[in-house]
Image: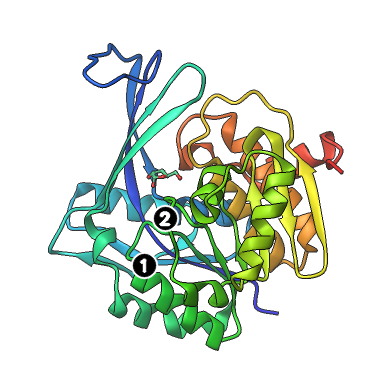
């Protein structure tokens, strides 16, 4: 079985300010600290899978700047294969301007830079890698047309497609639903897609059913500190969240997807893989930053041993 995880997605440098509270419009606020941390939903998911010791490659773009060099070096130091990350000479690297407050709440503003130029040429770089992979991870920080073409190529190659519909779209093209095996919205994203409030296991179940009617096989709704609801064609289950002290939830959703994909690529059952995703996400919320917060396999295994897997 091919066990490689492929990611087709965004690579950003996160500019992070720790603040006492999130500023209101017009407010000037004295922050606690400032750091730059490698991020981007695609790169975060790739690093999450790689730290779980699964061979991982990313296809995407960085800009022709210092951030681009640092982002590539950082991915490589985490053993993410970057041979097919294109250095786009026409623009700068993607950045995210992030404020995280004392209650671990955040605001994120993303400036796409090179991520916004990802297109057909990048899908062509991705396609030859598909036969070496079992899973393709997609998110929505690159143009939707490229996401859709990548999903088509993966389906043709028999590779499982996991779509994180983040940032939340108001709607997805109907053809994309039938190209995706697993969709993983959080509560806000689920609400955007189904147009009703999703904040309980019951409403998550209703949302999952609607997404399945649109053509998705498996819907996994991430309810943050409440847990995860999962519905397949013939089964559904709810996994309560692991209880941890969250200091920064940036990339916790990405950590979930990396953990889920890593476990599925190694032959774990869906329920086990959702538990791995939940543990990886929970551990990420206990540390600051995006990729700086992602746990190693050793930490996830120890955490799962200490915490009876939730039932
Ligand atoms: O999901 C978290 C990520 O969203 C951050 O790393 C930031 O880059 C934005 O893309």
| Label 1 within 8 A of ligand 1 by Cβ | no
Expressed as whole percent of the image width and height from the top left, the position of residue 171 reads 44, 60
Quadrant in the picture for residue 169: bottom left
Residue 81 lies, in percent from the top left, at 45, 65
Image quarter of the C terminus: top right
Q: Residues within 10 Å of mark 2 (few under 14, many from 20)?
A: few
Answer with the quarter of the image where residue 119 lies: bottom left
Q: Name the spot of residue 165 as percent of width and height, x first.
A: 49, 57
Is residue 300 visible in the rendered structure shown here?
no
Instruction: Left or right? Give the position of 214 relative to 1.
Output: left
- The residue wearing badge 2 is 169
Tell which circle, 2 or 1, labels the residue nearer the N-terminal end.
1
Residue lying furthest bottom? 156
Residue occupying image coordinates x 44% and y 83%: 127
Secondary structure of residue under mark 2: loop
Q: Would residue 292 appear left or right of 303 to someone viewing this image?
A: left
Q: Is 104 above or below relative to 204?
A: above
Front-most of 106 and 299? 106
- Which mark is drawn over residue 144? 1
Please state which of the two labelled residues, at mark 2 or mark 1, is closer to the viewer: 2
């Amino acid at each position: 079985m091919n066990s490689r995880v492929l990611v087709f997605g965004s690579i950003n440098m996160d500019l992070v300010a720790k603040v006492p509270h999130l500023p209101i419009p017009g407010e000037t606020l004295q922050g606690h600290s400032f750091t730059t941390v490698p991020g981007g939903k695609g790169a975060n998911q790739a690093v999450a899978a790689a730290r779980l010791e699964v061979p991982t490659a990313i296809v995407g773009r960085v800009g022709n700047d210092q951030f681009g060099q640092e982002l590539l070096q950082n991915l490589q130091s985490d053993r993410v294969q970057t041979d097919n990350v294109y250095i786009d000479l026409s623009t700068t690297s993607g950045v995210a301007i992030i404020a995280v407050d004392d209650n671990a709440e955040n605001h994120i503003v993303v400036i796409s830079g090179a991520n916004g130029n990802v297109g057909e040429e990048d899908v062509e770089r991705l396609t030859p890698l598909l036969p070496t992979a079992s899973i393709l991870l997609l998110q929505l920080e690159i143009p939707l047309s490229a996401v859709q073409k990548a999903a088509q190529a993966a389906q043709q190659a028999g590779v499982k497609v996991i779509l994180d519909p983040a940032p939340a779209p108001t709607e997805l093209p109907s053809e994309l639903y039938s190209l995706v095996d697993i969709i993983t919205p959080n509560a806000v994203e689920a609400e955007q897609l189904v147009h009703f409030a999703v904040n309980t296991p019951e409403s998550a179940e209703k949302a999952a059913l609607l997404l399945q009617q649109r053509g998705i096989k498996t819907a996994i709704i991430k309810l943050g500190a409440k847990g995860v609801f999962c519905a397949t064609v013939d089964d559904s289950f709810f996994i309560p969240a692991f209880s941890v002290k969250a200091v920064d939830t940036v990339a916790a959703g990405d950590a979930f997807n990396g953990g889920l994909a890593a476990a599925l690529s190694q032959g774990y059952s869906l329920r086990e893989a959702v538990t791995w995703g939940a543990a990886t996400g929970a551990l990420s919320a206990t540390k600051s930053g995006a990729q700086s917060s992602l746990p190693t396999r050793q930490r996830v295994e120890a955490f799962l041993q200490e915490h009876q897997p939730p039932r």
